[in-house]
C-alpha cells in the first residue's frame, strides 16, 4: 500500500477526493487529511507519504509555499485546483500531475498511475526555476519538464527547435540535433509554448520561429529550419504565419 496525504482547505474537496481514492485506487491509503497548509507541512514531515494531493489556493499557505517548506523531500505531488489558467498547463510537465476540481474518477486514476512510475530527475536549480515561474501566471516559461519513461527531463524552451506530432505522442527536436519522444499530444505543447515564440504551422508541426532558415512560397509554402529540415505550412495558417515572421 502506498501512503497518500490530502491537503485542501475545503471540506467537500477533501471528502470527495478521499472517496474517489478509496473507490478507484485500492493500493492507496490516505494516511491523513489536512485543512490548511501549515498542518499539511507537519503531516508531510511526520508521515513522509508516497503521494501528496495538494490544493494550490489556500488562505494560510499556498500549495507552492507548502512545497517550499519541504523542498528537500522527494515528494510525488498531484496538484488539485479549480483554476484552468494558461500557466496550469505547465503542471503536466512537473512531478507529477494536476487535477481540476471537481475531480473525475478517470483523472484520479491517470494521475495516480503516473505517480507510480515517474520520479523527478533533474537539475535542482531548474526545478526551482520551474516552480518560481508557475507562481507567476503571466510569466512566459523559460524551462519545462518533459515526462520520460524513467522520470522528468528539464529543458530550456529556447533549446527546442520544433515539435512533430506522432499519433498521441510528440517528437521534440532540439537545436543540438537531439530528439526525444514524449507521451503528450502536440496540442498540449502548443498551449504551453505559443507565448514563447512558437507557432503551429501545420496540424502535425509546432515550430520555434527563431530557428527558421528560409520560407519558400507556394500554396501554403514551406519552411526550412536551421537543421535543413523542411516543414509544410498549411494554407489555413499561411496568412497568420507570414504576419508573425515579419515581427521576428
Image (cartoon, rainbow, N blue to C red):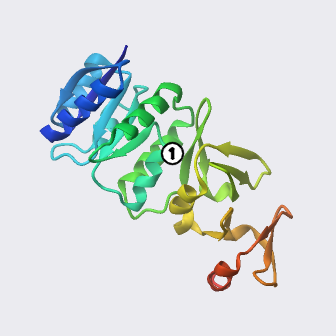
Regarding residue 248, the answer to whether it shows in the image is no
User: Residue at 84% across / 63% down in the picture?
Assistant: 229
Quadrant occupied by the N terminus: top left
Is residue 183 shown left or right of residue 99?
right
199 to 99, vertically: above or below: below
Is residue 65 shown left or right of residue 157?
left
User: Residue at 13% across / 38% down in the picture?
Assistant: 11
User: Residue at 15% across / 47% down in the picture?
Assistant: 59
Which residue occupies the extreme left position in the image? 11
The one nearer the camera, 137 or 116, is 116
- Asked which secondary structure carries label 1, the reply is helix
Q: Position of residue 138 (x, y in %)?
A: 39, 64
To which quarter of the image does residue 9 belong? top left
Regarding residue 123, the answer to whether it shows in the image is yes
**Total numbered labels:** 1
Q: Position of residue 182 (x, y in %)?
A: 63, 44
To which quarter of the image does residue 61 belong? top left
Amino acid at each position: 500500500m502506498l501512503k497518500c496525504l490530502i491537503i485542501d482547505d475545503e471540506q467537500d474537496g477533501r471528502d470527495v477526493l478521499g472517496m474517489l481514492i478509496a473507490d478507484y485506487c485500492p493500493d492507496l491509503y490516505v494516511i491523513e487529511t489536512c485543512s490548511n497548509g501549515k498542518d499539511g507541512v507537519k503531516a508531510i514531515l511526520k508521515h513522509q507519504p508516497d503521494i501528496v494531493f495538494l490544493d494550490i489556493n489556500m488562505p494560510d499557505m499556498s500549495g507552492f509555499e507548502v512545497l517550499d517548506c519541504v523542498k528537500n523531500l522527494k515528494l510525488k505531488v498531484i496538484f488539485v485546483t479549480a483554476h484552468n489558467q494558461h500557466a496550469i498547463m505547465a503542471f503536466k510537465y512537473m512531478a507529477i500531475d494536476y487535477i481540476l476540481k471537481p475531480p473525475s474518477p478517470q483523472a484520479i486514476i491517470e494521475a495516480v498511475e503516473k505517480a507510480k512510475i515517474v520520479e523527478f530527475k533533474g537539475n535542482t536549480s531548474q526545478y526551482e526555476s520551474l516552480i518560481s515561474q508557475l507562481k507567476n501566471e503571466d510569466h512566459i516559461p523559460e524551462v519545462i519538464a518533459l515526462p520520460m519513461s524513467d522520470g522528468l527531463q528539464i529543458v530550456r524552451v529556447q533549446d527546442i527547435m520544433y515539435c512533430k506530432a506522432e499519433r498521441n505522442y510528440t517528437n521534440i527536436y532540439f537545436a543540438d540535433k537531439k530528439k526525444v519522444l514524449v507521451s503528450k499530444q502536440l496540442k498540449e505543447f502548443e498551449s504551453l509554448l505559443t507565448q514563447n515564440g512558437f507557432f503551429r504551422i501545420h496540424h502535425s508541426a509546432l515550430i520555434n520561429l527563431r530557428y527558421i532558415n528560409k520560407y519558400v512560397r507556394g500554396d501554403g509554402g514551406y519552411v526550412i529550419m536551421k537543421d535543413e529540415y523542411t516543414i509544410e505550412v498549411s494554407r489555413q495558417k499561411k496568412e497568420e504565419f507570414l504576419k508573425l515572421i515579419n515581427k521576428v
